[in-house]
Amino acid sequence: MASIGIPGLLLILTVALIVFGPSKLPQLGRAVGQTMREFKQSTAGLLDDDKKEEAKK
């Protein structure tokens, strides 16, 4: 799996700044953070359910 690196990250952030504008970037960042948090919680819940089922067997 290839990593993005610093130059790629700067390019992505620059394009995001141009496309969304400086006033929308904090809202976009919050939305991405909430999405990632919810994804982690739901995957952790699925893994816990699998572990509980294995423990019952």
Image (cartoon, rainbow, N blue to C red):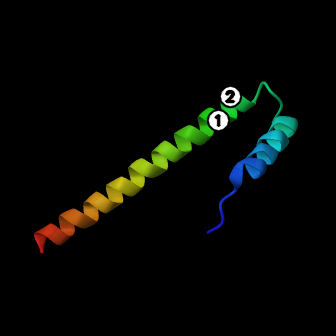
When asked about the image quadrant of residue 30, the answer is: top right
Give the camera-side residue of 5 and 44.
5
Helix, strand or loop at mark 1: helix
Is there a contact, CB below 8 Å, between mark 2 and mark 1? yes
Which residue sits at x=83%, y=31%? Answer: 21
Q: Residue furthest top?
A: 23
Give the camera-side residue of 20 and 7.
7
Residue 28 is situated, as x and y percent measured from the top left of the image, at: 68, 35
Judged left or right of residue 32, residue 48 is left
Between the residue at mark 2 and the residue at mark 1, the CA separation in whole angstroms equals 5 Å
Which disc is residue 29 wearing? 1
Residue 40 is situated, as x and y percent measured from the top left of the image, at: 44, 50
- On screen, 20 above or below 12? above
Name the amino acid, label 1. Gly
**Quarter of the figure with the N terminus:** bottom right
**Quarter of the figure with the C terminus:** bottom left
- On screen, 36 above or below 1? above
Name the amino acid, label 2. Pro
Helix, strand or loop at mark 2: helix
Which residue sits at x=48%, y=51%? Answer: 39
Q: Residue furthest right?
A: 18
Judged left or right of residue 28, residue 41 is left
Q: Which residue is mark 2?
A: 26
